[in-house]
């Protein structure tokens, strides 16, 4: 009597991806999928609105003008110089902070997808970063409008250095979203800690005030050792017509390397538990 051999249940080819590396790389190459997800999510958020995502830009404009008017007086700054400084920092801060905050619910809200559809978890991460990049482009027009009105000479060839800086920020956004998403999925209280930490970071990071206003130990802690400041600096400085310091680039590359190593190790260790934790 002939027998039919069945494929081994443990055959790794039966799964869509078998390793964390395959998940990250495979998800990256499915740009059509996560790009479409990002765009549809933007459209969904602003359904039946006339201005759509430009409402974010309008809100940012009003916020920047109001805070900039008060801040210029508090910090004894020239309004025409302070406002471009503030808006160039705010658009990058908004990008970084939104990625971090939305990462808290990345895998929590995504369970309905990956429980029913076989695809790489990293696609959710790429969609999140891509979505916030779209919002950044909208907010960038606020920077252009304010800078062209107050300090048009700031926009030159040096501003092109903001492009590689932005790429570094987005590249870091991927590991941040992956790591924060995992922690907040496993420990739901972490979301509250992250939200509190972001409120504090907004105040202690040189966004409303310039880095040279601190000295000594405070300068070292809140500026030199502040990873968020380093990521903001490599994009903001070119937008202000100044090349970023080598120290900022070195720090940004160190943050990128350390962050990706940690995120990859965590993802490799706990990737198979994501569906159960959700």
Image: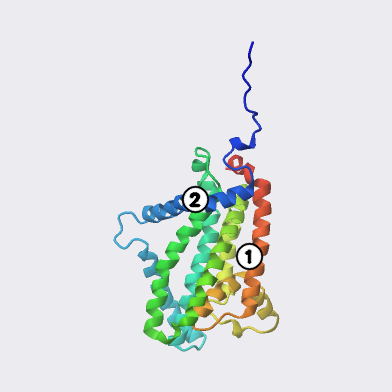
Question: Badge 2: few (under 14), some or many (20 or more) residues near its Cα, within 10 Å?
Answer: few
Side of 137 relative to 257 (left or right): left
Image quadrant occupied by the N terminus:
top right
- State the residue at coordinates (68%, 78%): 220
- State the residue at coordinates (48%, 73%): 90
Residue located beneath label 1 in the image: 256
Residue 187 - label: none
Nearer-the-camera pick, 134 or 2: 2
Q: CA distance from mark 1 to mark 2?
A: 23 Å
Residue 16, image x, y percentages:
57, 40
Residue 106, image x, y percentages:
53, 51
- Assign a secondary structure to mark 2: loop
- Count every numbered label the image shows and give the total: 2
Nearer-the-camera pick, 265 or 58: 265
Question: Badge 1: few (under 14), some or many (20 or more) residues near its Cα, within 10 Å?
Answer: some
Image quadrant occupied by the C terminus:
top right
Residue located beneath label 2 in the image: 30
Residue 164, image x, y percentages:
53, 71
Q: Nearer the viewer, mark 1 or mark 2?
A: 2
Side of 97 relative to 190 (left or right): left
Looking at the image, do the residues carrying marks 1 and 2 touch, with CB atoms under 8 Å apart?
no
Side of 34 relative to 222 (left or right): left
Residue 91, image x, y percentages:
47, 71
Residue 93 visible, this orientation: yes
- State the residue at coordinates (54%, 50%): 27
Question: In the picture shown, does residue 114 fall above or below 175?
Answer: above
Residue 208 visible, this orientation: no
Question: In the picture shown, does residue 159 fall above or below 181?
Answer: below
First of labels 1, 2 by sequence position: 2
């Amino acid at each position: 009597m002939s027998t039919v051999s069945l494929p081994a249940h443990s055959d790794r080819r039966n799964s869509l991806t078998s390793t964390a590396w395959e998940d990250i790389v495979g998800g990256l190459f499915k740009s059509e999928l996560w790009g479409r997800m990002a765009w549809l999510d933007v459209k969904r958020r602003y359904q039946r609105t006339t201005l759509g995502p430009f409402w974010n830009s309008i809100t940012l404009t009003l916020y920047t003008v109001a805070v900039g008017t008060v801040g210029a007086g508090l910090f004894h700054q020239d309004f025409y110089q302070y406002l471009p400084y503030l808006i160039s920092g705010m658009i990058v801060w908004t990008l970084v902070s939104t990625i971090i905050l939305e990462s808290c619910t990345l895998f929590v809200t995504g369970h309905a997808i990956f429980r029913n559809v076989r695809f790489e978890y990293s696609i959710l991460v790429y969609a999140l970063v891509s979505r916030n990049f779209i919002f950044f482009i909208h907010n960038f027009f606020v920077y252009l409008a304010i800078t062209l009105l107050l300090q048009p000479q700031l926009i030159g060839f040096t501003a092109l250095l903001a492009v590689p800086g932005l790429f570094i920020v987005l590249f870091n956004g991927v590991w941040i979203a992956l790591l924060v998403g995992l922690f907040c999925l496993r420990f739901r209280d972490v979301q509250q800690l992250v939200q509190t930490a972001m409120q504090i970071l907004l105040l202690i990071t040189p966004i409303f005030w310039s880095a040279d206003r601190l000295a000594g130990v405070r300068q070292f802690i809140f500026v030199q050792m502040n990873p968020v400041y380093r990521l903001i600096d490599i994009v903001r400085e070119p937008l202000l017509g100044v090349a970023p310091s080598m120290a900022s680039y070195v720090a940004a590359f160190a943050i990128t390397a350390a962050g990706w190593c940690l995120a990859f190790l965590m993802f490799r260790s706990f990737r198979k538990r994501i569906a159960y934790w959700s």
